[in-house]
């Protein structure tokens, strides 16, 4: 059992590292290069709009359900049919709100059909997340790993055929990309549904409206957390497009940088998906979560700091490699956005812990302030600096949110200040900046080699300072699971 759990973690990370980066850089990036920055900017803005109100579609049910099923798997029989009914109703409400906002913000009717399918894609994606919350909550981590990457694998095959082996006449259209997502999400959701359905002792679809009301009430605090986080992570794209005269082009530039941040966030998202049921189980059993928090935080920060600093130094080389229309301005946007990944990765650990602990009311105070901070800074910086101003706003907001959540977790669990760990992390930061600066300026090698050496140096330094300790990680997981 212990060996199986450890293998599942490796399997989860491996399958996502193989498939999702290929989709992001092989498919999504190619689509932007083919359709152009402005057209992709329209798509990215509409996509951000669907994310902005995605909470209506989910209402915190995924996190609530994952925590509940992890602690009591027998609840699946009662929860499954009722939550399916809830999500169907929420999906309808979500579509109404999305198009109401599109009308209020005066989006051209020419793009409404794209917005419709993007909204449908969001509904399907939320169904997949819900099914996965049951799969992981039941301990089927390996199956969850496969499902987590299945939609992207299907997208690779479908879009690969459309991009490189055209089966339709004419130039590739952004609509094709959206339709391919719809097909991929639908097939993945269907497979995930039957996996969960087969785990029900006696499949039933009796709907209990009193129970539905109870579920919505219990999941409301989770919903507010997700909604507030969605605002300060997605409103910037919409504001860039709405405020600036060349907003569609600037949104495309911001989307180009955000693509790498999204790719990096994949690891943090995997950490959060694994940690939420683990934290929930440990808290129920009154087991100390501090060793797991410390281990996971040091692991993710060592990688995040290394990747962010390396990307910051090699920003121009990276955008010139990836994008046809890239300029040094694109590199500046990418460099600032990637520095925010350090903060985002910490949020994945401490935000997940606070969610598992049920400290949602206090967490929401932090997020409300983060939203206000984000909107104010965007209004100040976007008119003057464009997408770069939005990137700086993201950096400030994410670091505020991370530090506040770390302090809240420290207070909630009564942890003492650990100056040894703080010094280790600060030492790592200083050393890795010096090392990567030296690699960038003083090594006369191809930049790809220098970039690779920078990453390897970060891994080596992390082991040297004890931030990465794989033996301890596996021993810990074996002892607890």
Image: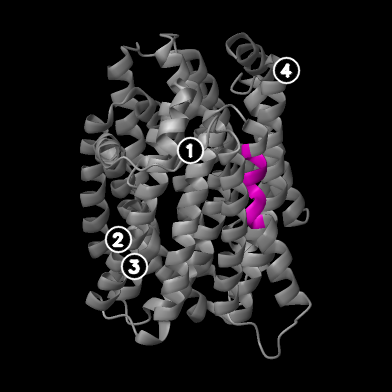
Q: Residues within 10 Å of mark 2 (few under 14, many from 20)?
A: few
Residue annotated with mark 1: 345
Picture coordinates of residue 283, whole percent (x, y): 41, 15
Q: Which residues are magenta?
A: 144-152
In this rendering, position of residue 326 left or right of residue 362: right
Colour scheme shown? one colour
The quarter of the rendered structure image containing the C terminus is top right
Q: Residue furthest bottom?
A: 170
Near-viewer residue (296 or 152): 152
Near-viewer residue (306 or 221): 221
SS label for mark 3: helix
Q: Is residue 378 placed above or below 343 in the rendered structure?
A: below
Q: Nearer the viewer, mark 2 or mark 4?
A: 2
Residue annotated with mark 2: 93
Q: Can I make out residue 183 in this image?
A: yes
Q: Residue at x 32, y 31 (%)?
A: 405
Of marks 1 and 4, which one's residue comes earlier in the chain?
Answer: 4
Q: Is residue 362 placed above or below 244 in the rendered structure?
A: above
Picture coordinates of residue 62, whole percent (x, y): 42, 40
Near-viewer residue (404 or 269): 269
Picture coordinates of residue 19, whole percent (x, y): 70, 51
Give the numbered dot on residue 238: 3
SS label for mark 1: helix
- How far apart marks 1 and 2 lie (CA) works out to 32 Å
Residues at discs 2 and 3 in contact (Cβ within 8 Å): no
């Amino acid at each position: 059992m212990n060996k199986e759990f450890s293998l599942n973690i490796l399997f989860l990370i491996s399958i996502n590292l193989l498939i999702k980066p290929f989709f992001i850089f092989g498919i999504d990036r190619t689509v932007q290069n083919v359709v152009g920055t402005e057209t992709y900017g329209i798509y990215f803005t509409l996509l951000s709009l669907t994310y902005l109100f995605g909470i209506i579609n989910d209402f915190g049910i995924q996190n609530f359900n994952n925590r509940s099923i992890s602690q009591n798997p027998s609840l699946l029989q009662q929860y499954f049919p009722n939550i399916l009914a809830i999500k169907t109703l929420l999906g309808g409400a979500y579509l109404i709100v999305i198009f109401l906002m599109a009308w209020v913000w005066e989006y051209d009717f020419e793009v409404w059909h794209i917005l419709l399918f993007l909204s449908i894609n969001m509904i399907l994606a939320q169904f997949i997340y819900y099914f996965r919350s049951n799969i992981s909550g039941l301990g089927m981590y390996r199956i969850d790993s496969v499902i987590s990457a299945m939609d992207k694998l299907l997208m690779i095959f479908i879009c690969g055929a459309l991009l490189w082996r055209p089966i339709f006449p004419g130039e590739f259209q952004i609509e094709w990309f959206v339709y391919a997502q719809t097909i991929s999400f639908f097939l993945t959701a269907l497979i995930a549904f039957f996996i969960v359905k087969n785990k029900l002792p006696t499949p039933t679809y009796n709907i209990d409206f009193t129970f539905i009301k109870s579920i919505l009430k219990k999941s409301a605090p989770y919903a507010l957390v997700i909604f507030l986080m969605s605002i300060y992570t997605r409103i910037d794209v919409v504001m860039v497009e709405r405020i600036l005269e060349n907003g569609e082009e600037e949104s495309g530039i911001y989307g180009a940088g955000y693509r790498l941040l999204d790719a990096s966030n994949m690891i943090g998202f995997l950490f959060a998906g694994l940690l939420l049921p683990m934290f929930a189980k440990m808290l129920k059993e009154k087991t100390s979560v501090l060793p797991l928090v410390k281990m996971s935080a040091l692991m993710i920060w060592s990688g995040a700091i290394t990747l962010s600093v390396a990307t910051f130094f090699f920003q121009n080389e990276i955008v010139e490699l990836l994008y046809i229309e890239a300029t040094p301005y694109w590199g500046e946007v990418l460099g600032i956005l990637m520095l925010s990944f350090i903060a985002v990765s910490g949020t994945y650990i401490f935000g997940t812990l606070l969610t598992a602990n049920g400290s949602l009311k206090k967490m929401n105070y932090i997020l409300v302030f983060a939203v206000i901070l984000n909107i104010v800074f965007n209004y100040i910086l976007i008119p003057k600096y464009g997408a770069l101003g939005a990137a700086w706003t993201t950096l400030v907001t994410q670091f505020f949110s991370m530090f506040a959540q770390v302090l809240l977790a420290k207070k909630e669990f009564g942890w003492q200040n650990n100056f040894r760990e703080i010094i280790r992390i600060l030492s790592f930061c200083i050393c890795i900046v010096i090392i990567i600066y030296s690699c960038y300026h003083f090594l006369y090698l191809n930049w790809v080699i220098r970039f690779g050496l920078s990453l390897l140096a970060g891994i080596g330094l992390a082991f040297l300072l004890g931030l990465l300790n794989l033996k301890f990680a596996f021993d810990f997981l074996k002892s607890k699971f």
